Amino acid sequence: MFSYILRRCLISIPTLIIISIVSFVIIQIPPGDFVDAYISERLVIDGSINDVDALRASIQAELGISDNMFVNYFKWISGFPQGDFGYSFQHQKPVQDLIWGKLGLTFLITFVTLIFTLVTAFFTGIFTSLKPYTFFDYIVSFFGFLGLAIPNFLLALLLMYLSLDWFGTPFSGLFSPEYLNAPWSFAKFMDAMKHIWIPVIVVGTAGTASKIRIMRATMMDELHKPYVDTARSKGLPAYKVILKYPVRHAVNPLASTIGWMLPELVSGSAIVAIVLSLPTTGPYLLEALRSQDMYLAGTFLMMLAVLTIIGTLISDILIALLDPRIRLA
Amino acid sequence: MTSQTHLEQSPDTELNQTLSAQAEDNGSDIAYASKTKLMWLRFKQHKVALFSAIMIILFYLVAIFADLIAVQDINKYAAKYKYAPPSAVHWVNSEGDFTWPFIHDLKRELNMETLEFEYTEGDKEFPIRFLHRGYEYRVLGLFKTDIHLFGVDDGAALFLMGSDKLGRDVFSKIVHGARISLSIGLIGVLLSLVFGVVLGGISGFYGGKIDTFIQRLIEVLMSFPSIPLWMALAASLPPQWSPIFVYFMITLILSVIGWTGIARVVRGIVMRLKEEKYTEAALLSGANNFYIIRKHLLPGATSFVIAQATLSIPAMIIAETSLSFLGIGLRPPVVSWGVLLQEAQSIEVIANYPWILYPSFFVIVTVLFFNFLGDGLRDAADPYMNRA
């Protein structure tokens, strides 16, 4: 088991390197850079600039960047082991001072959504497979298809509209005003938990719908196999017949989807965060992209991918724990 | 993943009945049906998928003949109809008789308390005319006409789904937006198909190092959360580019991720078919690689690829809508459903003028239909498989 985990960790190292390159290249694609944007802004304010090249060079020296993409990349990547992700031009702060809080909240929302999705899919999947083609089953598949078809941002808009209609104030943000700038405490955590359910529902709906279908389908396949009949005929109580055999089997496909569920959840939470103005990665990434704040945007993009890599790693280990056949292969 | 079985009765009994009836017609005991026919027979049983296919065709027809269906010129502003609510269509006239549907003219008053315009219905009746003469346009860019499917005479304005802040008809804009929103998914999927089939085919056929490399690439691309990646790519499009160019770049960006799913399906099938006896036989008879791929491997993969491609269209439509909604996708004057929803960004607008959200209904319905169609196609893709 240990060697399996080690091997799996080693495989993800080259993937991480490729991800860092891809993130950086994508950020560099837009024509012009932060310095150009800054200079054109100065042009508007000052009217004219005597020596554009000199100004350019001085700003570049101040920000510690050069025209060469490779130099910039290696400068950025070499700081990683020390936890140095470069400098945000726009916020005039080191990137690492800016990202952790946002990434932490992104992780919190993603994690809570993941748990919500898996728990809901697990139980609903079992119930609908035990009583297929009933009213409850049809209701679930109806909402399932609807959940798959509604874009996340639209669901967020609708919930915002409904909360305005029902409670008089539109839902937005992750904290009540009194906790907004307060340091982290148990009370603040509980306050966040009170607000978190709307983004969790919005981000989780589509995933939950497809996971219920997977769980239901594998359960339906397993329920009629001879080993279930055997378990029943030897007199096991009904809950044990279900939970101990077919459910154990049906959990595997569910667990193996965690890996590719994470990119979906992170990507869904990014757009929902923009609509609901949550203090997570989404809005800040968008802002950084717009202002061409390359190190900040690159680090955000890379960290989001890293988050999903770690998730895939965990899900692979989880599957290996659940299914001995994979461990030994 | 097994798909849901919608039919109570085993689908194969029905299939067998059809086939045996056919056999009797031919006067023999042997029923014959080609693979395509078997697929069609199985697809036909999936009633929801069949209905979805018809609706999707209808949507595309509306998109092609958008000007015929549209009521108003979407480039014409009418300040006096700012945020007019959807017109109430009446069936009963002032005498209480049942008549041809008509609408009333609109009267606008400024509410001095809220400082908002409020619309009330006037007394005049305007029947909704079939094949009405409205604004001039060109059919498919060829010849000029002014015939519209329906409309009302001057003096009143027909807003089936209300009007926007510049007094333009939301319904007409949705009809026009269908062109971009529906075609972006189709073109994006075509591009993904090209990338996916070529790279997935190479990966599955040659195996070895090329396979490992392509699979690694797919893994990396899939581990990026798609919306942030799309955001990064879309934000890199300079604002001075022409709308048409931005449109093509957005489709290209959408297919950057879209191809990975298709490539995986193609690779799996090619790897399986490569081991089949007939492929081996062709190889031993001296057929070259290209011939084998074209003649033996691709035909086997076609139906699965089509099903997978259909299932990836909805994601593209949602992505375009989301990007445009955020303001980093398509921009006005281009009309797409996402661009239309940009107006719904503020909660005040949604609260006061909820009909601005109408385009989202069409996004949802289109995605639903594509999902159902894709499910049906996937079930029909392998007609030899026995469904439990």
Image: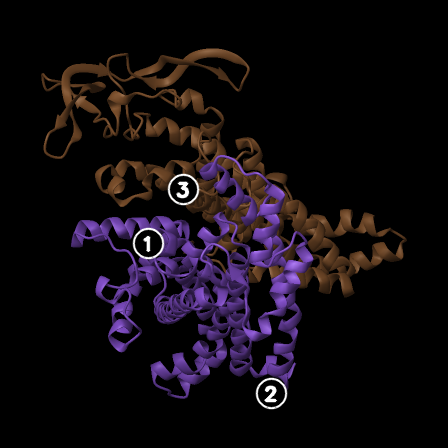
Chain colours: A purple, B brown
What chain does mark 2 sit on? A
Q: Around disc 2, counting alpha carbons within 10 Å, would you say few (fewer than 14), some (14 to 19), or many (20 or more)?
A: few
* Circle number at residue A2: 2
Q: Position of residue B312 (x, y in %)?
A: 53, 49
Q: Residue at x 35, y 51 (%)?
A: A275
Separation of residues labelled 3 and 1 (CA atoms) = 21 Å
Q: Around disc 3, counting alpha carbons within 10 Å, would you say few (fewer than 14), some (14 to 19), or many (20 or more)?
A: many
Separation of residues labelled 3 and 2 (CA atoms) = 48 Å
Q: Position of residue A49 (x, y in %)?
A: 54, 38
- Disc 1 target residue: A276
**Do discs 1 and 2 share a chain?**
yes
Foreground label between 3 and 2: 2
* Circle number at residue A202: none
What chain does mark 1 sit on? A
Q: What residue type is disc 3 on?
A: Val
**Closest to the observer: B344 or B299?**
B344
What chain does mark 3 sit on? B
Q: What residue type is disc 2 on?
A: Phe
Please, is residue B237 above or below residue B385 in the view? above
Residue A159 is left or right of residue B6, and the answer is left
Q: What residue type is disc 1 on?
A: Leu
Tell me the quarter of the picture where residue B356 sits.
top left
